Image (tube, grey):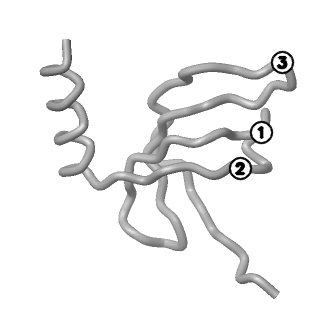
Amino acid sequence: MAKDIKFEIIKEIGVLSESSKGWRKELNLVSWNDGAPKYDLRDWAPEHEKIGKGVTLTEDEMKALKTLLDTEG
């Protein structure tokens, strides 16, 4: 049996989109399994009771992504 995943949303940063079923693609600062908070981009069910696959980024990775997006312009 798979280990339960524990998470705590430290800060809700924003919603990128919402599906017709209410799932939202969100950028949040999340602590997974009591670890250090990381930037997290994934789909969440309406009350955060279920999660989809996503990506987590450290602060340095988020800064690098922002730099890439800013220079893409």
67 relative to 43 in the view: left or right: left
Assess disc 1: are there few (<14), some (14-19) or many (≥20) residues with their C-alpha within 10 Å of its C-alpha. some
| Above/below status of 8 relative to 73 | below
Please give the name of the residue rendered at 63% of the width and 52% of the height, measured from the top-left corner: 53
Q: Tell me which numbered mark, 1 or 2, is placed earlier along the sequence.
A: 1
Q: Secondary structure at mark 2?
A: strand
Please give the name of the residue rendered at 19% of the width and 40% of the height, measured from the top-left corner: 63
Residue on which disc 2 sits: 51
Quarter of the picture containing the C terminus is top left
5 relative to 38 in the view: left or right: right
Q: Residue furthest top?
A: 73
Q: Where does residue 34 sit, x and y in percent of width and height? A: 49, 72
Q: Residue furthest bottom?
A: 1
| Above/below status of 37 relative to 72 | below
Say which quarter of the image contains residue 48.
top right
Foreground pick, 46 / 60: 60
Q: Residue furthest front?
A: 72
Assess disc 3: are there few (<14), some (14-19) or many (≥20) residues with their C-alpha within 10 Å of its C-alpha. few
Tell me, yes or no, whether the two marked residues, 2 and 3, touch with CB atoms within 8 Å: no
Tell me, yes or no, whether the two marked residues, 1 and 2, touch with CB atoms within 8 Å: yes
Amino acid of disc 2: Ile
Residue on which disc 1 sits: 45
Amino acid of disc 3: Ser
2 relative to 69 in the view: left or right: right
Residue on which disc 3 sits: 20
Quarter of the picture containing the N terminus is bottom right
Amino acid of disc 1: Ala
Q: Where does residue 4 sit, x and y in percent of width and height? A: 72, 76
Q: Tell me which numbered mark, 1 or 3, is placed earlier along the sequence.
A: 3
Q: Nearer the viewer, mark 1 or mark 3?
A: 3
